Image (spheres, grey):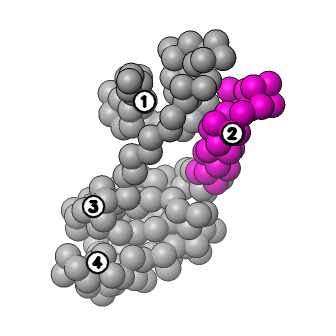
Amino acid sequence: VAMLSSVLRSKRAIQVNVEIMRTFVRLRQLLASNAQLARKLDVAFDSIPLSDVAEFLSEKLEVQVLIDREALTEEAIATDTPVTLQFQGITGDVLMSRWLKPLQLAHDIENGLLVITTMAKLQERHVTKLYDVRELFDRGLHPSRLIAGLSKTTPGPWQATDGEGGTLTLFAD
């Protein structure tokens, strides 16, 4: 699919190619961050402020952590909320879920940063994008091949294959 624009040489194909390349850059960032989040940690927090736990994780996982203070303030969650956890050999991503979920918080990778935000704010970040790809179809690309190609080459998760996540839908005239 990525080479399609060089074959078709159309504005639409080039736009789709640019979006695919952006997706691959994001995927590369996610993979690098996921490798860091896969590190195993031993933690023992006893009423440690949320912001100090974030700083600890930033050092141990070697990733920049950003607390979305505005989102936390909107939900009346203080950055000095005490955290009590004790785990041995837990991966960073599992620790993030175990630590954040009870506080109605979540994490996401954004521009290479590990962002801690509220679950509500994370839901707002989901984006719907529409692309007019009729020109690709006019040149012989079958819709099912485009959808299959995008599903396989982008990170997902996808509703059709993973049971949750995004969808790729064809809208006809």
Mark number for residue 11?
Answer: 2
The picture quadrant where one finds residue 99 is bottom left
Cα separation, mark 2 vs mark 3, equals: 37 Å
Q: Is residue 161 in view?
A: yes
Residue type, numbered disc 2: Lys
- Check disc 4 and give the amino acid type: Leu
Which numbered disc flags the more N-terminal residue, 2 or 3?
Answer: 2
Residue 50: give its label: none
Q: Residue at x 39, y 37 (%)?
A: 166
Which residue has dot 4 on it?
Answer: 72
Residue at image mark 1: 168
Q: Which residues are magenta?
A: 1-30
From the image, tell me which residue sits under label 3: 119
- The residues tagged by marks 2 and 4 sit, at their Cα atoms, a distance apart of 42 Å
Spatial CA span between label 4 and label 1: 32 Å
Residue 87 is at least partly visible in this image: no
Disc 2 vs disc 3: which is toward the camera? 2
Q: Is residue 95 above or below residue 77?
A: above
Residue 134 or 26: which is nearer the viewer? 134
User: Which of the 4 image quadrants contains residue 118?
Assistant: bottom left
- Magenta: predominant secondary structure element? helix
Mark 2–mark 4 contact, CB under 8 Å?
A: no
Quadrant of the image containing the N terminus: top right
The disc, 2 or 4, on the residue closer to the chain's N-terminal end is: 2
Q: Position of residue 172 (x, y in %)?
A: 39, 22
Q: Earlier in the sequence, mark 3 or mark 4?
A: 4
